[in-house]
Each structure stands twice: as structure tokens, then as C-alpha cells.
Image: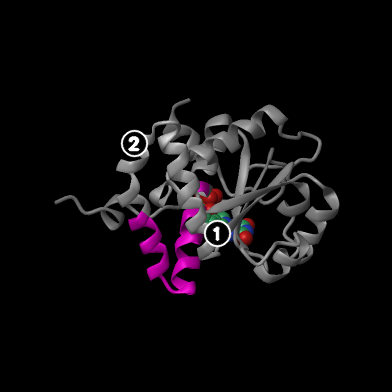
Amino acid sequence: MGFLDNLDWRFATKEFDPEKPVSKEQLEKVLAAIRLAPTSYGLQPFHVYVIEDMKIKKGIKTNAFLQKQMDTASYLLVFCARVDKDDMKQRVDEYINLLAGEDKLKKVKLEPARLARKASIQSKSAEEFATWAMKQCYIALGFGLAACAELKIDSCPMEGFSKEAIDRVLELPESLKSTVILAIGNRKEGPKNPKVRFSNDELFTHI
Ligand SMILES: Cc1cc2nc3c(=O)[nH]c(=O)nc-3n(C[C@H](O)[C@H](O)[C@H](O)COP(=O)(O)O)c2cc1C
């Protein structure tokens, strides 16, 4: 099956079959795709908690309208936005170091970019900055979803949970905010409804 067939095959799975867990190898591939997702300035302003522990899954479920995905999934990937501006300015330095490696001249050439990125971060209000970081989580989520489809792993993107409560369940530091969850596993049963999408005409304008 091709890429589009696989995207058509996937659906927001409501319940997974715990008897058919996703393997560690498959999980690693999904995480690799998430890692390869593009992000603004390449800063990857998120951290993903990969949850296998049943007690934590149940704790999340309690704060997520008791949705069955939460404790039947093989893994819950909780995308957390890095919302601390100082932390992100430090990450700019780390990113430039990774980019330049041992090349001192390259590092000098990257200095304007380093300063511009830090200035851009500094210019945002705390709220704008958090929104920016959260948007990057969704790009990574999309890559994870597409990877699952390609690997024929079932998944469900999920926002139906209390973010404050999940932050507490995961004992997150102030600098991290849970944003969106990707539940992965193998479906218990197929989709109840056909796939519904608006038409191309409604979605796209070619000019
Ligand atoms: C950001 C986001 C959050 C979502 N949150 C939930 C959720 O909490 N629970 C759920 O059952 N489905 C959730 N969904 C799934 C959507 O309802 C589903 O993707 C949509 O209806 C399209 O159906 P399909 O994915 O089966 O093609 C979410 C989807 C996205 C993209």
C-alpha cells in the first residue's frame, strides 16, 4: 500500500487491544520520525514523555474523560511544550554548537543567526512564546501520526484531557506544559464511521 492508502487506513482509534502490543522496535521508529520533524528555527521546543507504566496511564485516563485509549494503548506519547524563554535561549546556544561542531569559523559566521534567534525569543510575551512552542508540538505530532500510518500502527491524537492535571500526574517542572497526546497501539476493532473529509474545492484554492 502507498502513502495515501496508509493515511486513509488510519483512524482515530478509540480502543486498543492490549493483547497486541506495539513492539519496542516500532516505537523507536515512531520516535525517530518525531525527532525528524521540522520545527521553527530547528529548536525542537518540546519534550516527549513515552509512557508505558500502567499506573501513570490510569492517572492520565482519570483526567481525560476516562477515554479508553489512555489505558489500552501500548504507549502514550505526551508532547510537552518547553515554555521557558531563558531555557530556550540556552537551547539556541546548544543548537548553534551542534550546527557548527568543531568549526570555529562556522560558529563565528552563525553569530548573527544566534543573536537574531535569541532576540526573536525575547521579543515574545510569555503567552506568545508558549503558543509558539505548543505549535511545534503539533508538527511533531503530525509526523508521529504519519509514521504510525506508514508502519501500520494504530494511533489516536488526543487533546481531551486536563492539561493542568496531567502536568501534575507527570510531575512536570514549570518549564514544561503538556500539550497533546499521541496514543499508539493496535486497534481492538475497526472504525465505526466512514472517513469524513471536506471536498478539495472546499479546502484548496489553486491560483
Ligand atoms: C489535536 C487533536 C486532538 C484530538 N483529540 C481527541 C480526543 O481527545 N479523543 C478522541 O477520541 N479523538 C481525538 N481526536 C481525533 C479526531 O476527532 C479525529 O482525528 C477526527 O475526527 C478525524 O477522524 P480520523 O482521525 O479517524 O480520520 C483528536 C484529533 C486531533 C488532531
Q: Is mark 2 on a helix, strand or loop?
A: helix
Q: Which amino acid does label 2 sit on?
A: Lys
Q: How many labels does the image show?
A: 2
Q: Residue furthest left?
A: 207
| Residue 94 falls inside the magenta stretch | no
Residue 18 percent across, percent down from the top left: 79, 40
Q: Quadrant of ligand 1?
A: bottom right
Residue 25 position by quadrant: top right
Residue 129 percent across, percent down from the top left: 46, 67
The residue that mark 1 highlights is: 87
Q: Which amino acid does label 1 sit on?
A: Asp
Tell me the residue at 37%/40% (across/down).
107
- Mark 1 and mark 2 lie on one chain; the one further toward the N terminus is 1
The residue that mark 2 highlights is: 106
Is residue 10 shown above or below 198?
Answer: above
Real-space CA distance between mark 1 and mark 2, rounded to the nearest whole angstrom: 24 Å
* Label 1 neighbour load within 10 Å: few <14, some 14-19, many 20+: few
The residue nearer to you, when weighing 198 against 77, is: 77
Is residue 64 shown above or below 112?
Answer: below
Instruction: Name the colouring of the figure.
Output: one colour
Mark 2 Cβ and ligand 1 under 8 Å apart: no
Residue 50 position by quadrant: top right
Q: Is the magenta stretch mostly helix, strand or loop?
A: helix
Residue 171 percent across, percent down from the top left: 76, 62
Residue 106: tell me if it is visible.
yes
Q: Looking at the rendered structure, which numbered label has been put on residue 114?
A: none
Tell me the residue at 52%/32% (across/down).
150
Q: Do the residues labelled 1 and 2 touch (CB within 8 Å)?
A: no
Left or right: 122 as drawn, with respect to 190: left
Residue 187 percent across, percent down from the top left: 68, 40
The residues colored magenta run 115-140
